[in-house]
Amino acid sequence: MSAAEKPAGARTIDELLAEARSRLRRVEPQEAAERAEHGAVLVDTRPASFRDRDGAIPGALVIERNHLEWRFDPASDAKVPEATGYDVEVVVFCDEGYSSSLAADSLRALGLHRATDVIGGFQAWKAAGLPVISGD
């Protein structure tokens, strides 16, 4: 098999993303803000450089993508206090709403059945005029 030949069973990232999103009820930024007002945990998975450059959402919990599952698995010794159980509502966002779909689906696989993500990510939140703390 050549390096460019796709192995049997391999899927493209577009296929993986579509599968993940088929299991989510994604939310627009305004709905994410409303859910946060009613107890949902907003989780910013963007790298520090993006938060420094563009700002952050007030009250959002910052957990970079590579730690997310450990921090939200209720059975993990590394969980955050917000990981109170499998019924916690987690709304994940990334920069533009792509990796957050994969992340939210991963949380759902852990049993967090109310996990979802923000359509358009942080950039859509900011464009909607919702609160942002300066990154500078």
Image (cartoon, grey):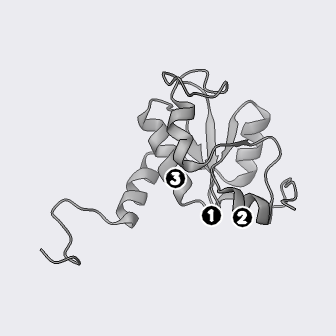
Residue 20: image location, x then y, percent: 42, 51
Residue type (three-letter) at the residue carrying disc 3: Ser
Is 30 located above or below residue 81 in the figure?
A: below
The secondary structure type at the circle numbered 1 is loop
Amino acid residing under circle 1: Glu
Q: CA distance from mark 1 to mark 3?
A: 10 Å
Task: State which quarter of the image contains the N terminus.
Answer: bottom left
Q: Is residue 95 left or right of residue 85?
A: right
Residue linked to disc 2: 123
Determine if residue 94 is in view.
Answer: yes
In this rendering, does residue 24 appear at all? Answer: no
Q: CA distance from mark 1 to mark 2?
A: 6 Å
62 is higher (above) or lower (below) than 50: above
Q: Which residue appears at 77% of the width and 41% of the height?
A: 34
**Quadrant in which residue 8 is drawn:** bottom left
Q: Alpha-carbon neighbours of circle 1 within 10 Å: few (<14), some, or many (≥20)?
A: some
Of 33 and 50, the residue lying toward us = 50
Which quadrant is home to the C terminus? bottom right
**Residue most toward the left?**
1
Q: Secondary structure at mark 3?
A: helix
Circle 2: element type: helix
| Percent x, y of residue 37 | 80, 35
Tag 1–tag 2 contact (CB < 8 Å) = yes
Q: Which residue is mark 3?
A: 101
